[in-house]
Image (tube, rainbow, N blue to C red):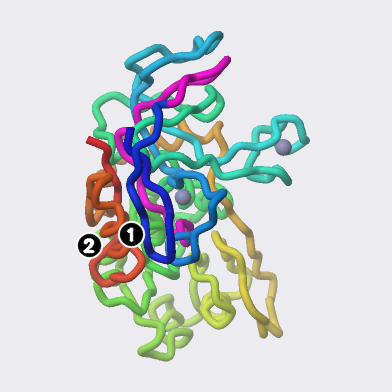
Amino acid sequence: MKSAFHTGVKEITIRETPVPTPGPGEYLVRIKACAICGSDTWWASPASDTEPVHGHESAGVIEACGPGATRYKVGDRVVCYAIRGCGSCENCRNGIPTRCASSQFVEGGFQEYSLFTADLLFPCPEGIDFVTASLLSDAIGVPLRGLRRLPPAPTDSVTVWGLGPLGLLQVLFLRARGVKQIIGLDTVEARRKKALELGADFVLDPAGCDVVAEVAKLCGGDGADKAYTFVRNAQATETAVRSTKKGAGICTFVGLEGNFNLPEWLERTMVWSFYFTPDEYSDNVRFLQEHRIDLRRVVSDVFPLDRIGEAFAKRFADREHSTKIVITMD
Ligand SMILES: [Zn+2]
Ligand SMILES: [Zn+2]
């Protein structure tokens, strides 16, 4: 089978590898599609010999079942979960492996076959293509968990900071969920345009205006009721907070880097949100179906595995022309 290995800075090499045999409790999944994640930043770093085949946003078909693996059968369509916890700590027992101190990314999606245990597989809904299914593995779960961690009210004016694939999905889902007003912010013009297409009422370039004043004006004077932020740097986070009103909520999906100067919080609440829990998967699928959301609207490109290097270059070096990019294996 073909597997994509990280072999150097911005270098990925396809190599022939043996198809693995499923052990007890394991399933051999024929990967049909695997999306590139914003966290796949290994691409730009030097390669190491111990690196696995990357890719943690995959969907495919059960090709073979190991001894005792009975939950799925050959031919079943599945979506793969991307985090494995220890299985025994309090967080894992409570169904939140994302909070496990020894959690790991489940990689191996950028190749034709990979092994998974049943706890890392979900049934893929009928009638959706595998490119869309790969977005159920990770991308949609992040902003949908954001809506659970910081539920917006129908009367809220909200801001979304950073209009990469996840920010764009946040706009799409906020529109579906129903809020009074959505303001999207990004320095890349093409992404602002895309946010308008997906349901933002206004977009702003934070580098091109007094963004705190502009947001306040759009929100009737006091600032946003809620902010959902996918930006990491300290200055952007400060601006996101300053452009909310007193008592507002801020949901951040990324680590916060640098020193903050936030002298006055005035009862604002900041929550962190990370990935999604396995229990949320079926609710996520229901949300998409109820609101008839077409996830292909945030996919800018689909590349075959042979062209994965090109796909990564476009995803990370051409932000004007890329949103979500998915690799397919046929
Ligand atoms: Zn991911
Ligand atoms: Zn654990």
Q: Residue at x 61, y 44 (%)?
A: 104
Q: Is residue 271 left or right of residue 158?
A: right
Q: In the rendering, which numbered label is found on residue 312?
A: 1
Label 2 Cα crowd, 10 Å radius (few <14 / some 14-19 / many 20+): some
Secondary element under disc 2, as helix, strand or loop, is helix
User: Which amino acid is tagged 1?
Assistant: Phe
Vertical placement of residue 226 versus 69, above or below: below
Q: Residue at x 22, y 62 (%)?
A: 197
Q: In the rendering, at what x and y percent does residue 195 appear?
A: 29, 65
Residue 90 lies in the magenta-colored region: no
Q: Residue at x 49, y 55 (%)?
A: 153
Vertical placement of residue 138 versus 180, above or below: above
Secondary element under disc 1, as helix, strand or loop, is helix
Disc 1 to disc 2, C-alpha distance: 25 Å
Q: In the rendering, at what x and y percent does residue 167 appear?
A: 40, 61
Q: In the rendering, which numbered label is found on residue 197?
A: 2
User: Of residues 328 and 245, which is closer to you in this image?
Assistant: 328
Q: Is residue 318 left or right of residue 3?
A: left
Q: Which residues are magenta?
A: 20-41
User: Of residues 159 and 131, which is closer to you in this image?
Assistant: 131
Ligand 1 within 8 angstroms of badge 2 C-beta: no
Vertical placement of residue 176 versus 238, above or below: above
